[in-house]
Amino acid sequence: MSFFSFGQSAEVDVVLNDAETRKKAEHKTEDGKKDKYFLFYDGETVSGKVNVTLKNPGKRLEHQGIKVEFVGQIELYYDRGNHHEFVSLVKDLARPGEITQSQTFDFEFTHVEKPYESYTGQNVKLRYFLRATVTRRLNDIIKETDIVVHTLSTYPELNSSIKMEVGIEDCLHIEFEYNKSKYNLKDVIVGKIYFLLVRIKIKHMEIDIIKRETTGTGPSVYHENDTIAKYEIMDGAPVRGESIPIRLFLAGYDLTPTMRDINKKFSVRYYLNLVLIDEEERRYFKQQEITLWRKGDVVRKSMSHQAAIASQRFEGSAASESALEQAAKEESG
């Protein structure tokens, strides 16, 4: 307890101008829970008010200045003392002086660059927030308000299918094919698995979606693998010539866009892992990287008609095989 003051003599609050109409998005916190935050995109203006409310009306509040900041920063959990700021904007709201009654200050950060998606992972956190500060001689009064940023992409023009073989000489030969290599977060992975040679007794087969988070550089690189989804393809022994279809809906899983070398601090990549288990519990697997991207709720006018159709191809429900073939013809044409 301080002998000089009983806590702060004022409260600071940050209110966004479009708080009543702006969409909110769920975002995972460090403790694994999900909270809702105001959602912003790259290039959007961030504006609002900073309210300074005196706890004891009539009693003056001396200060060395009032400011509001818009900050984008990356925090590596193994290096918590250092916050790596990639966006740092400041607006001075009041010069040093005193406040004799509660006051409200307007602020606006115009067309703010927000280059990366908000992310909370195993070893790293990327966050955006507004920080209002009443600077004082002994203890500043600070209020931080987090927002969430989503990065949007347009439909990739080149989106080739994935064809791979996995095999053990004279024992097992499998071909598998996925319809695309790039998927939006609400997409459907459509594929087939062909058994060309089966001389070992396979009892179980599944596809896993694996998220790999990489942090750090050089000798201090940390890898965290997290199995996001398990999709059972088959339970029982396949026979030669058998073909098994795959249809995996991504919308129900906790996924982010693929992030590559974000500010030279971390990466998040996704892999499809084909796993086979034989009767002696031996595991055979083949891994293939896929690219995930976030599509906007509204298709932008700048997109061509064909791209707009393509971007909606798997929205809501899986497309038929004929639709896939037709889409492939359109892309090649």
Image: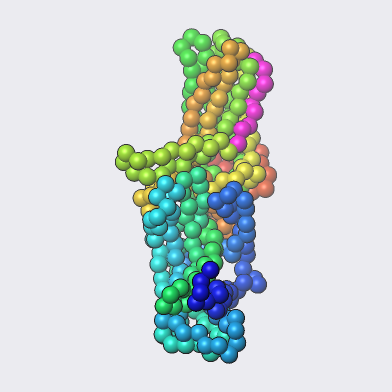
Which residues lie in the magenta part? 229-238
Vertical placement of residue 265 versus 110, above or below: above
The residue lying at 37 percent from left, 45 percent from top is: 216
Q: Is residue 129 left or right of residue 261?
A: right
Give coordinates of residue 187: x percent, y percent.
60, 45
Q: Is residue 232 magenta?
A: yes
The answer to whether residue 133 of the structure is visible from this angle is no
- In the image, residue 24 above or below residue 320: below
Q: Colour scheme of this structure image? A: rainbow
Q: Is residue 302 magenta?
A: no
Does residue 124 sit above or below 22 in this rendering? Answer: above
| Helix, strand or loop: magenta stretch | strand
What's the residue at 59%, 64% (across, down)?
A: 38
**Residue visible at 41% across and 40% down?**
222
Please identify the quarter of the rendering in which residue 202 is found. Answer: top right
Residue 315: percent from left, percent from top: 64, 48
Tell me what residue is drawn at x 55 percent, y 25 percent.
Answer: 275
**Which quadrant of the structure image shows residue 283?**
top right
Any part of residue 10 in sight = yes
